Amino acid sequence: MKKVLTIAGSDCSGGAGIQADIKTITVHKMYAMSAITALTAQNTTGVYGILEATPEFVGHQLDCIFEDIRPNAVKIGMVSNIDIIKTIARKLSEYEAENIVVDPVMVSTSGGKLLDDDAIEALISYLFPLATVITPNILEAESLVGFPVKVKEDMRKAAEHIAEFTKGSVLVTGGHLEGTTTFDLLRTREKEFWFKAPKIDNPNTHGTGCTLSSAIACNLAQGLTLHDSVKKAKEFITGAIKANLKLGKGRGPLNHCFNL
């Protein structure tokens, strides 16, 4: 059985964070492990509190995982401060982790802020260089590059800019663009690929970014190319949104089990 590690925050309502990651990994018939960076008090209507783990305890979790059950891929989500980021980068380098997917989680789907401003530079400096692929959405890409991303050409410029921070690839997801079609751009060192799909009329997209990055990690663990890993992950996300699960009073979660 392939093993996938998620390093992220907990979402007590189950729609995002490590809960979404573990569901996604399990549905892909792989063994899920987690190193928790923070506890959040949140639901479909917002984020109401964050309790961070200490950097030392995050490192201790990673030691226990890598020294016993080595993961075939690693997904990194919410990492809320500089010291935690440095600890994760040091441990992943020490254990020569492979197939690293970095989802630069900065703001929740409901609009709650999840990353300190001074942590963004640390994310760029310490984690991005280790990534196989970085998966920002439009809003996260804007935070990283400092200019608006409104159309496809803006996505291309943003991907080029973010690619300067890593030896890996960049996937800019365009679900926040206006229009009836979504465009996602995968920029590798050799070429670029556009993934086009009709926009699904469903406001319940809580945890979409977490789920997508975890699905990509699963596909990389399986040995697929990055292009095929993204393509299959996009198909999984589409199905999970189309399942039209309706839970909660705000922007509800995906149905991770739609294909069971």
Image: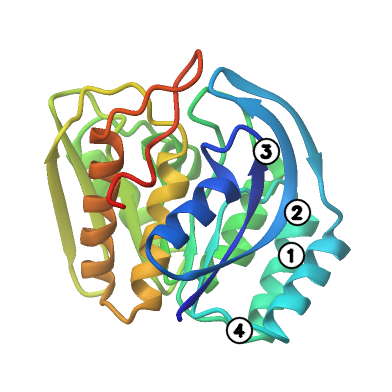
How would you rate the neighbour count of disc 3 (Cα within 10 Å): few for under 14, some for 14-19, many for 20 or more?
some
Mark 1 lies on a secondary structure that is helix
Q: In front of the other: label 1 or label 3?
A: 1
Q: Position of residue 36 (x, y in %)?
A: 71, 55
Q: Indicate which disc, 4 or 1, sits on the residue closer to the N terminus.
A: 4
* Residue type at the position of mark 2: Ile
Quadrant for residue 224, please give it. bottom left
Which x, y percent locates residue 61? Answer: 77, 68
Between label 2 and label 4, give the one nearer the viewer.
4
Question: Element type at marker 3?
Answer: helix
Cα separation, mark 3 vs mark 2, equals 10 Å
Q: Residue at x 57, y 81 (%)?
A: 97
Q: CA distance from mark 3 to mark 4?
A: 32 Å
Q: Is residue 38 above or below residue 34?
A: above
The residue where tag 4 is placed is 70
Image quadrant holding the N terminus, namely: bottom left
| Label pair 1/2, CB-CB below 8 angstroms | yes
Label at residue 86: 1
Residue that mark 2 sits on: 82
| Depth check, front residue: 133 or 4 | 4
Number of other residues with Cα within 10 Å of mark 4, as a class: few under 14, some 14 to 19, many 20 or more: some
Of labels 4 and 1, the one closer to you: 4
Image position, residue 248 (x, y; %): 50, 19
